[in-house]
Amino acid sequence: MLLFVYPSKKDMKAHIGQRLRYEETSLFGIEYIADGVIVGANRPHMTGMGREFFAEVTMEAGLIKAVK
């Protein structure tokens, strides 16, 4: 699961149309994809910011298209 570097899901939604800020956490390979759906979370004890949330992000051409 990717680690999103945003203080809240609301803030993440405000960045639709921009590049995704994230950290890879998998030991088994890259999870980020430029086109498709990515599932991830913000874990404040790891990022040091905001509140914990989980999100499903639709990416298109390397930009955030939608956040659920």
Image: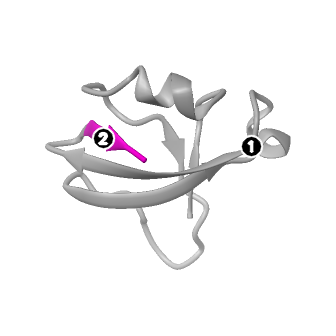
The mark nearer the N terminus, 2 or 1, is 1
Query: Which dot marks residue 52?
Result: 1
State yes or no: residue 51 in magenta.
no
- Residue at image position (56%, 64%) is 1
Q: Position of residue 29 (x, y in %)?
A: 46, 73
SS at badge 1: loop
- Residue at image position (66%, 45%) is 53
Residue lying farthest bottom?
28
Left or right of 18, for residue 35: left
- Residue at image position (85%, 43%) is 45
**What's the amino acid at mark 1?**
Glu
Left or right of 60, for residue 7: right
- Residue at image position (19%, 55%) is 35
Left or right of 33, for residue 48: right
Q: Which residues are magenta?
A: 64-68
State yes or no: residue 65 in magenta.
yes
Alpha carbons under labels 2 and 1: distance apart = 19 Å
Residue lying farthest right?
45
> Mark 1, residues whose alpha carbon is within 10 Å: few (<14), some, or many (≥20)?
some
Query: Which dot marks residue 66?
Result: 2
Q: Position of residue 38 (x, y in %)?
A: 39, 59
**What's the amino acid at mark 2?**
Ala
